[in-house]
Amino acid sequence: MLQRLQNISFLDVALWALGAIIIFVVIWGTVATIIENPYPVHTWVETVVAGIAQGSLYALIAIGYTLVYGVLFMINFAHGEFFMSGVITATIFVAQPMQATGFLDAHPIISMLLIVIVSISVSVGVALLTERVAYRLLRKAPRLVPLITAIGASFFWQYFFRGLYGSKVKPFPQFEVLTGKAAIFGIPILKSHILVIIAAVLMLIGLYIFIMKTKVGKSIRAVAENKDVAALMGINVDKAVSITFAMGSAMAGIAGVLFAVVFRQVHFFMGFIPGIKAFTAAVLGGIGSVPGAALGGFILGMVESIGPGLFLEGLNIPAPHQLKDVIAFTLLVLVLIFRPQGILGERLSEEKA
Amino acid sequence: MKKKLFVILSLLMLSVLALAACGGSKFECEDEIGCVTYGPDEPIRIASALVISGPNTDLGTDSQYGVEIAIAFQETLLGHKIELQAEDDGCSAEGGQTAGQKIVSDPTIIAIVGTSCSGAGVPMSNVVSEAGYVMVSPSNTAPSLTDPEQAWNPGYLRTAHNDKVQGKAMAEFALNELGVTTAAAIHDGDPYTEGLARVFADEFEALGGTIVEFTAVNKGDTDMRPVLAAVAAAGPPEFLYYPVFTAEGAFITKQAKEVAGLEDTILAAADGMISSAAAEAIGDAGEGMYFSGPDLSYSGGLYEDFLAKYVEDYGAEPISVFHAHAFDGTNMIFDCIEKVAVQDGDTIHIGRQDLRTCLYNITDFEGITGTLTCDQYGDCADPKISVSQLIDGVYEAIWP
């Protein structure tokens, strides 16, 4: 016990004190808000549902970060661009022409399927190309090298698609069937939010089953455990890595379509901020852990959505919603102080950390 | 040390000798800041720093076309060709800083037309002023930029209206024309959006209305529902004014109708969202919403020539609102260069302080946007504000 106490450094104490202060401010703000009670119940419900929907998108994107980190121990900063590339292509070549010809309103389900297929194909294509050209050759290089390459790849794809499609904000058509609200347990919820939440949960469950129950999933887990031993056991490491990239970017492709359904506009720069947020979500949940990324995404979306109203409104801070990113990143700092491996992360061995 | 001094002295001697040998060059620059000299075949160089990338491209490109047309109409200035170096202000503080640094590192540039966005104008005017250059902005409208207590720097002027005028016009329109009594305003932290939203809110209250919520979002935010729900909970207001840029503005427009309590709220935005790209991004959701902006119902022969040239060169009607302001700003610069330049054979010398003084003293300059007179802090506009309504994807001027 004494031994442990001696190992605690001044920095640890300072960080804990910082954490304690932040938690105190949050509790104070929350209590003050509850006493002041500025919002009616339906506002809270609306905010929470928006948070869950935003969180589902973060979760789907965060999966891509965590999967790649799991097998390659690199942060793939180009992942936000995989998310953007699919949906922006699908919007221009599928969604907008179909809306112009009226096909979209006549056959919404077929249209949606086409949009999803195109989006996934482009996202996966871009991801596999990036992996083959930019990452594979660097697999034995020091870990900083692929990280910087990933940032370069991110810029490359952003400006590649800007050159291809122009820099304007492009509207994504509204689906007639997804317009308006539906009552669930008597609570009116936007139909697009319902679609996003259900789709995200199904995808996450499907992915978990794929990784835990199938042979391919097993090979991915083996490569994540130890690439050399996996190769000795007859597993094709390159193939497993490619499949991992394909899985992650397919999730991103679908997340892109869901994003477009909710927000109805796309842009070449749209992947950047969701990419950073999803990375935060992945670290929050414990990078390398699939359930962790999903949980981190949902928590981040919720905190961003209700945080400003709940924590800051009571402290009478003007324009609290401008500070939602501050709240999101403060949460990350808190988690890293008290639980450096993330909420569901395992303590990493020396080799992985 | 002594050796260095000796070298410098001998170099000085040499140059004096060389000058004396030439014998022709009698010009001595007496300008407080310094002079720019253009030799016989050298073009006069001006720079533009407008937003020509990202979602607000139309805003800056449109102004740049205005500058290019001014150059084309001018053809030559004191026998010299005019060359434009186009930079990008990125519509951000960082972009303005970078463009400013790049321009002032080039001593052959005499003046700058820019920036498009007030957010870029604040840091850029610092850089430009420090270096002794002069800038004329066609579309910065934030009140702080010409307020010496806040962000004004010597050498900064603008042909765009001050948002004190625009905010007031919108408040009057909302109260008197639409007859609303409660309003809310949202900005995104940019000096332009915050300044305009603040002026609107102050004027609206001064005229007897009630501001139920004054709040902000971030640039780059996509999910506006939490902030809109907060606005709805505070009022809900009859009128919502969000003078932000295209991407965020389109998100607010689309999501506002889906937030309980805001279904019947009248939506309004400002000149940052008047462009064909913005109309396309907003789509059906913005049908019937209002926009404040400079009155574009120009008339006169000069404007007809300008418009014909614009359509001929760029194949379309003007794509945004500040083309004429850029045209006028560029012509003001040409006018002053003509006045202050010292001709020395085919060589001309332009004093930077002389150019500044001339611009600040401009009175009754006849431009497309009206009769321009600059005050001591660089507000040159002849401000006319109108309100337009988005009908079938087209901005129709409806007031005054």
Image (spheres, coloured by chain):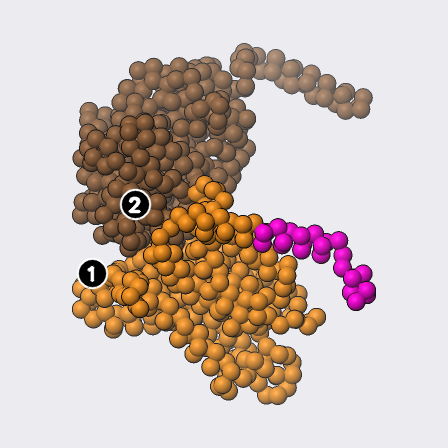
Horizontal arrangement in the rendering, residue B392 relative to residue B119 (left or right):
left
Q: Quadrant of the N terminus of chain B?
A: top right
Q: Secondary structure at mark 2?
A: loop
With respect to residue A89, does B26 lie above or below?
Answer: above
Residue B391 visible in image? yes
Amino acid type for the residue under numbered disc 2: Pro
Which numbered tag is attached to residue A100? 1
- In the rendered image, residue A13 lying in the magenta stretch gets the answer yes
Q: Nearer the viewer, residue B334 or A226?
A: A226
Question: Residue B291: x, y in percent?
Answer: 26, 38
With respect to residue B130, does B116 lie above or below?
Answer: below
Residue B325 visible in image? no
Q: Nearer the viewer, residue A138 or B115?
A: B115
The residue that appears at 38% across and 33% down in the rendered structure is: B198
Question: Residue B260: x, y in percent?
Answer: 29, 53
Number of other residues with Cα within 10 Å of mark 2, as a class: few under 14, some 14 to 19, many 20 or more? many
Q: Quadrant of residue A197?
A: bottom left
Chain identifier for the orange-coloured part of the image:
A
With respect to residue A255, does A334 lie above or below?
Answer: above
Q: Nearer the viewer, residue B124 or B301?
A: B124
Chain identifier for the brown-coloured part of the image:
B
Q: Quadrant of the C terminus of chain B?
A: top left
Amino acid type for the residue under numbered disc 1: Ala
Horizontal arrangement in the rendering, residue A130 relative to residue B362 (left or right):
right
Residue corresponding to mark 2: B236
Q: Nearer the viewer, residue B247 or A227?
A: B247
